[in-house]
Amino acid sequence: MHKLLTDSPGQKMLMLGNEAIARGAVEAGVAMASTYPGTPSSEISLNFFQMSRESELYFQYSTNEKVAMEVAAAAANSGVRSMCIMKHVGLNVAADALMTLAYVGVRGGMVIITADDPSMFSSQNEQDNRYYGKLSGLPVVEPSSVEEAKELVGYAFDLSEQLQEPVLFRTTTRINHSSAFVTLGALKPPETKGDFQKDPFRYVTVPAVARRLHVKLLENQARAKELSEASPYNFVEGAGGWGIFCNGVSYSYVSDAVRDLGMQDRIRIFRIGFSHPLPEQKIKAFLGECEKVLVAEEGEPFMEEAVKAFAQEAGLTLPIRGKADDLFSRLYEFDPAMVRKTIASYFGIDYAAPPAIDVQDVPDIPMRPPNLCAGCSHRATYYAVKKAAEGMETIYPTDIGCYTLGFLPPLSMGDFLICMGSSVGTSCGFSQATDRKVVAFIGDSTFFHSGIPGLINAVFNGHNLTLVILDNGTTAMTGHQPHPGVDMSQLQMEGYGRVSIEAVVRAVGVRHVTVIRPFKVKKSIEQIREALAFDGVSVIISQEPCALYAKGLKLLKGKPFTVSDKCKNHRDCVNDLACPAFYIQDDRVHIDADLCVGCAVCAQICPENAIRPVKIEKTA
């Protein structure tokens, strides 16, 4: 049985933050969950996927976040509790549905997980999605600890049904990926089937209907304000004339800092857990008892701006600061030492940071930049494209996934990236605005997510470009989740369809389609040259399973390779491929047999034919 289905109320269990969120949803009776995977939210989806195989929960990996939102919205408007999970930039994709869903509302509870990523550990920006609450008019709640994350999910579902609106549940990476002991509550049996009650003048948002729905949304916002004022997740602790507003993980840092500084009798903390709409009256009362206030929040000055506005309305002139060069930055995530130092500085508290540990006798930690795995088919594809395009003036738009790492030397196959699916759309622009050959790269999952519209655009408008679809048979970067092109029978799972990338590409009108096996280097280069020479839209589908995925499915059959005495130390293998299985020792190239998966790409490019399979001696 999956550990999150343990029905033992009162038992304590060590959980990752994302596991706690999934457990909280099950305790709240969630019946349907949908997602497009994205770090730092991916483990929530993984646990739902696993639990759905041994419970009544319905779960799906959707084509993209917009579709996931629409699936959950339909369930919620049939009276079924639903959850939609995505990372912060995923909400940009789902925003079209979100904005109008706020007008329509829901009948069953609907919670939308938006996992923000301060410091961009795995993201292309660090946007603050609290502003989506303000933009859409929807409630936003955010936990400050792993255990609170579990409890707050149930509160969010109840709040959603009380307001008949979706609720945004905002986390940050530090909450998602921290671990703590969580006390289990009772499991609520899910109501898996509902009934949609037809009411076109509520659900069909033509202008005449939407105008009335906007009025209803504003009425719900007024009710949400009242609930925020009474919410137990907006609370004050401590005493004194100085005040600190905080939210999320910053509450833990602030609490520790105030205690470490011995300022419990001088500093009052206002923790915000229901962050949109903010509890205006509570905040004004708090400000009225303070001489000076600091706002500690990761990301943008969302609370700071509101607190200053409330102070102005109340006629208060006390100092209120947060984001500034000498205080908290809008960049990256907080850490306890930085918060402690900033609080001491702002309130004029004598504080000397503990001396740094002397590490002069400790050698520097070797740098380990992100790299494509040993045996990654993307490396072989990039090498083949680079060889096929020699002598051409090229631009290489790329996309979101493992293969993005191909922009690093020595491959250097990535020139432009803004979002999921952008490789194809931007290629259209580059092909029109420049005279260079445009070769775009996109992964199989990303192609289904948002690459198809750009390809249709290229065909319709007659652009001259080559799109390389890197089909490694899984959504690799976020943990090998399935997508519409995955062969689910390999996972011993039935009831799924499978969409052929080649069939889709041909169906939208691409006239030159080539399927390559990138580990056959010479043939791949020849096929790619033909595609690059084609005038118009050409598509190359590079098919080879992700090495890690194949290893997990026990599909790897290659033998490791070794560098023989024939090597003349040209180092084409290292300088052109940079596979992490290579290492230099005594000024000679060697291959780590424990990392090598036997793809044989390096053996095919070695000018001396010096790279050979390891001979495995037969035992008697």
Image (cartoon, rainbow, N blue to C red):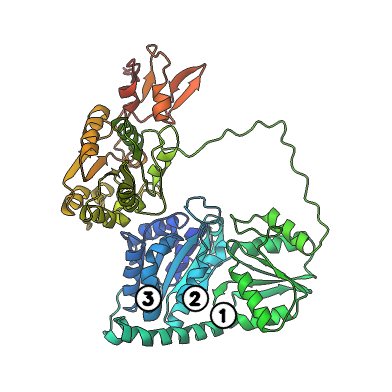
Q: Is residue 217 visible?
A: yes
Name the residue rendered at 81%, 56% in the picture: 351
Res. 243 in view: no
Amino acid type, mark 3: Leu
Which residue is under mark 2? 139
Residue 199 position within the rendered picture, expressed as x and y whole percent measured from the top left: 28, 86
First in sequence, mark 3 or 1: give its number. Answer: 3
Q: Residue furthest right?
A: 350
Q: Position of residue 402 (x, y in %)?
A: 39, 44
User: In this image, 570 relative to 239: left or right?
Assistant: left
Secondary structure category for the residue under label 1: helix
Query: Left of 335 or right of it: where is 462?
Result: left
Q: Is residue 612 above or below residue 217?
A: above
Please identify the quadrant where the C terminus is shown.
Answer: top left
Mark in the foreground, 3 or 1? 3
Q: CA distance from mark 3 to mark 2?
A: 13 Å
Say what amino acid the circle numbered 2 marks: Pro
Sequence-wise first label, 3 or 2: 3
Residue under pointer 3: 101
Give above or below for 206 relative to 123. Answer: below
Q: Residue at x 19, y 43 (%)?
A: 513
Residue placed most toward the observer, 134 or 599: 134
Q: Position of residue 482 (x, y in %)?
A: 31, 52
Question: Mark 1 belongs to which amino acid?
Answer: Ser
Task: Report crowding for label 3: few under 14, some 14 to 19, many 20 or more residues within 10 A (C-alpha).
Answer: many
What residue is disc 1 on?
A: 228
Residue 222 vs 599, above or below: the answer is: below
Q: Work out whether mark 1 precedes mark 2 in sequence or the reverse, and give the earlier one.
A: 2
Cβ–Cβ under 8 Å for marks 1 and 2: yes
Figure disc tally: 3
